[in-house]
Image: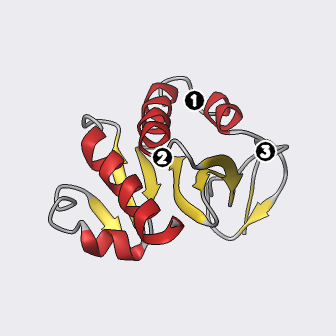
Amino acid sequence: MWKCPKCGRSFQREGQDHYCGEAPATIADYINMQPEQVQPYLRQVNEIIKSALPQAVEKISWSMPTYWKKRSLIHFAAFKKHIGLYPGPEAIEAFADRLSAYKTSKGAIQLPYNQPLPDELIADLAKWCEKRQGS
């Protein structure tokens, strides 16, 4: 077990990502709670998704920024070396050819900070999620 030196909570993994204190209430709160150097990437991802899904509701779900329309459509989150984008496993399969440059796992895509964000790909993923899941 690992104990966070800031908040004292215990976790199974050493250095596990978590919130010390209250979780954010809005996507803006979430972004503002992240390290300063990460915030521009998060704002860019948020704006891309917001533009792609103008009818979706913004909320925090699973402690991550989430776009929702009848159900969760897509999530994103900040990590030490990348932004995690969570469109779900069906989206990963559907976009496999366009995701070959990124590390993926079941339902998740890692967008490293040392590469430009794929704006068009993020927007296309978000629109696909809405069409597939939110109609």
- Secondary structure at numbered mark 3: loop
Q: Residue at x 76, y 41 (%)?
A: 24
Camera-side mark, 1 or 2: 2
Q: Amino acid at mark 3?
A: Cys
Q: Earlier in the sequence, mark 1 or mark 2?
A: 1
Numbered mark located on residue 120 in the image: none
Q: Earlier in the sequence, mark 1 or mark 3?
A: 3
| 10 Å crowding of disc 1: few (<14), some (14-19), many (20+) | few
Query: In whole angstroms, how far apart are the C-alphas of marks 1 and 3?
Result: 14 Å
| 10 Å crowding of disc 2: few (<14), some (14-19), many (20+) | many
Residue that mark 3 sits on: 20
x and y percentages locating residue 51 in the rendered image: 44, 37
Residue that mark 2 sits on: 53
The answer to which quarter of the image holds residue 71 is: bottom right
Q: Going by the image, does 112 lie left or right of 13? A: left
Asked if one can make out residue 89 in the rendered structure from this viewpoint, the answer is yes
Seen from the viewer's position, the closer of residues 124 and 61 is 124
Q: Earlier in the sequence, mark 2 or mark 3?
A: 3
Residue that mark 1 sits on: 35
Q: Going by the image, does 40 lie left or right of 97? A: right
Query: In whole angstroms, how far apart are the C-alphas of marks 2 and 3?
Result: 31 Å
Q: Amino acid at mark 2?
A: Leu
Location of the N terminus by quadrant is bottom right
x and y percentages locating residue 62 in the rendered image: 68, 61
Q: Going by the image, does 35 lie left or right of 82? A: right
